[in-house]
Amino acid sequence: MPLLYTLGLNHTTAPLDVREKVAFAPESLSHALRELITGGHAKEAAILSTCNRTEIYCRGGSPETVAVWLEDTHHLSKSTLTPHLYTLKKDAAVSHAFRVACGLDSMVLGEPQILGQMKQAARAAKAAGTLGVVLDRLFQHTFSVAKDVRTHTDIGSASISMAAAAVKLAERIFPSIADQHLLLIGAGEMIELAAAHFQARSPKSVTVANRTLERGQALAERFGGNAITLNEIADSLERFDMIVTCTASPLPILGKGIVERALKARRHRPVFMVDFAVPRDIEKEVGSLNDVFLYSLDDLSDIVRNNLAVRREAITQAEAMVSSQTEHFLKWFDGRSMVPTINALRNHYETLQQKELEKAQRQLANGQDAQQVLESLARGLTNKLLHAPLNALHTAEDEERTDLTVLYQKIYHLPDNPPPKPSDGDHS
């Protein structure tokens, strides 16, 4: 049975600049999928490519070959890609697919967008003709598991990160985040996480301010926003209703004076601020200004702590469901590997049956007694059915003979210590 496996990288194994290099644009997906199959790299294939992960789900071929194909496709050296890649085989691949669809492997735990992205990956593979029986069954089972997890646990509703807590606080201040303009200062992992959380609420605009404009633009483009440099913040601060910051700056980026000027220009419309940085990006005194709602890591930690119980219970329930359904799928998958052997056995015995039947028919046509023909047919079938297993037993070495004996007892339900066959003189 060809190997079932997943090869890829995600936000936990690769930085943004590497993830960007292996992303597949929607318009290039069909060609890439067909190339995987026609090039002999796999028998079935599907590609999940999002801002946080690129994963190739395969049946057949080898992970090593697919890794080389991925490098060649994106014109990357092995040293650039290999340190960030993971390969998950069979049961680990199945469990991983379930966890991804449930949001257990997401940057934002329990986020729902990934399920839609996996469905799109399956549709793309089906349209390209690369989704065979096994992967189709895997994805359909995956979607069913994700639905059950979201229905029967609180995985999608628990606030499980500082970024999620920030969104909840913002929703207490503004009637709708969709009407607000968001400024993200920095482009690291925490800002990336915050961007994902806030983007789920569809803010009116997203702007990323970063020391390096190029990196800020890369992040902004993923969320349909634009980028500015840190030097431009002072002149544009008044435009933003929500500000989330996390940089490695040793000194504050936003001082009390800059914020006061922005508030005056805003005619004292409220500003929501979250400072994830250590040391602070926003001067502590800013929090004393009217119309400013400033929260630090310490402020957010209480909200996160209050949701820990919900989070732990939801994760435990979800992981248990994933484990159970992984076992269920693997039973089906392993069963498929026995089909060729079952068919071969059936064909072998049907051939023996046909030969004995033809022999019996010839004997009857020659006028032999029907009772004798039936007895000969029964003896012939018995001898032919016993020939292979008895020959294997007689020619086996001691250890193998013991294993065969145990196996035959299991197959034919034989007693452990069969009684001796009566001799001709034993009439008892």
Image: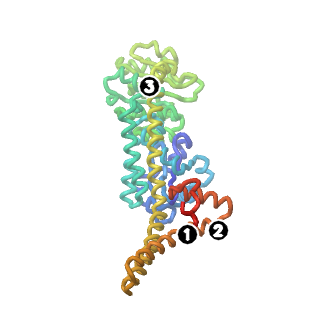
Q: Where residue 233 appears, x then y in whole percent?
A: 47, 29
Residue 425 occupies quadrant? bottom right
Q: Seen in the image, is 417 located left or right of residue 218?
A: right
What SS does tag 1 mark? helix
Q: Which of the labelled discs sits on residue 395, or is there none?
A: 2
Which label's residue is closer to the chain start, 2 or 3? 3
Q: Residues within 10 Å of mark 3 (few under 14, many from 20)?
A: some
> Dot 1 corresponds to which residue?
388
Q: Farthest right residue? A: 398
Q: CA distance from mark 3 to mark 1?
A: 61 Å
> Dot 3 corresponds to which residue?
310
Which label's residue is closer to the chain start, 3 or 1? 3
Which is closer to the viewer, label 3 or label 1? 1
**Residue 336 shows in the view:** yes
Q: Where residue 249 appears, x then y in whole percent?
A: 58, 27
| Colour scheme of the picture | rainbow
What SS does tag 2 mark? helix
